[in-house]
Amino acid sequence: MRPKAGMRRAPTLPVRQNGDSSVADALNLERRPTEHHAIPVNVLRQWCVPNYILAITDLHDEEALLCHVIRQARFSGARVLLAHVAQPSGVLPGHSRSSLQTRSMSRTQGAQYAVECMARKLRWVGVPCEPLVLEGHPEEKIPALARSCGVDRIIVTSRQASNLAGPGFVSIAEQVLPRLQAPACIVGPSVPAIPQSIKQNGRVTLAISLDSDIELPLSFACRFAQEHRAKLTVIHVFARDEHGTQFRQRTPVAIAAQLPHWAHQGAEFLCPLEITVREGDPAEELLVHDATTRPDTLILCSANLSCASQCGVKSLTHRIVSGARCPVIVLGKRRPDIACWGL
């Protein structure tokens, strides 16, 4: 049937006859069937522009922690809860329980004084801050505190103090990250103690895996990039293909076809978006991307940061946080609990 007058025939993409991959093949890839579970906009905004920030200190990370807390709190005008957890010590041979309690009280009082001094510095630069010292185990106290206070973001460092570092040393981030529900911003040992700039971010990178749920990370990343007026780069790292037989499935266009359609359209509407692919070890490739493109923030999908002392095997998240030159925001595996946000 001939097209009517005034109508234009839809252009056809050239398709090669020799079996090679083509643009038409890539564009015709079937999208992964996904259900549309829109995340409330106000929940994403609270995560991206937090009103209440929980900053966790081990009392040895003052310089690195406070600089990043000031930068993030000033951006959104957030209040800060500066918390430290004094871990209990066991009874040593030859020491009575009363002497142990005396040392514990002295240690707690010293921690309270140090945290108060840090909070005073934040208030001096105009950041509302409340100090808090708890006693117990960080992996239990901090997640419970974050839930009870309804914080929008947690900031924690992953630096090893010179007098604490050792083969069995586990940072606070490694202890609490798997149990946190709100986004956690981790300042790793390779991040400059003083941020280069306090201006809005220019580049945001989201690392995804097609084997996991990417709806929430993509929604959060594009909203975060929009609030900071930044360019969003979505990166996926494939395992190395020695024979080069899967080229068609390993292109940015193929990755775009696998993203949830509504989330992809929303991302392109909210911020400049580009998709890039790499092959090799995920941690190594992400660190190379971080070193070459110098993003302001790196976003990871899941919090699976394992303890470095477990069988000597470090998780993917641990390796990225340890080598990244920018703060890393790690999202939990769970969707935001709509009931707890009063919606």
Image: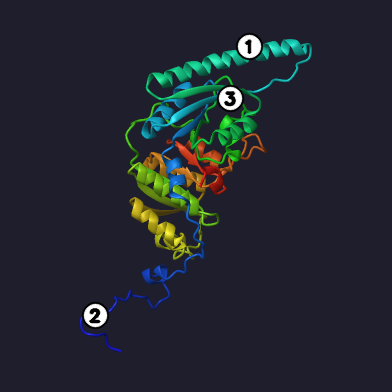
| Quadrant occupied by the N terminus | bottom left
Q: Is residue 163 above or below residue 196?
A: above
At x 45%, y 47%, the residue is 220
Disc on res. 165: 3
Look at mark 2 in the image and give the residue it sits on.
7
**Direction from residue 1 to residue 37 in the image, left or right:** right
Q: Is residue 2 visible?
A: yes
Give amino acid for label 2.
Met
**Viewer-proximal residue among 145 and 104:** 145
Work out whether residue 174 or residue 154 is closer to the camera in this orientation and state it.
154
Instruction: Identify the amino acid type marked 3.
Output: Ala
Instruction: Give me the residue at 53% from left, 31% from top.
Output: 158
Q: Which mark is residue 199?
A: none
Residue at image position (44%, 66%) is 248
For disc 1, the marked residue is: 106
Q: Give the camera-side residue of 36 and 276.
A: 36
The amino acid pointed to by label 1 is Ser
Pinpoint residue 17: horizontal percent, then vertical percent.
39, 78
Mark-to-mark CA distance, 1 and 2: 84 Å
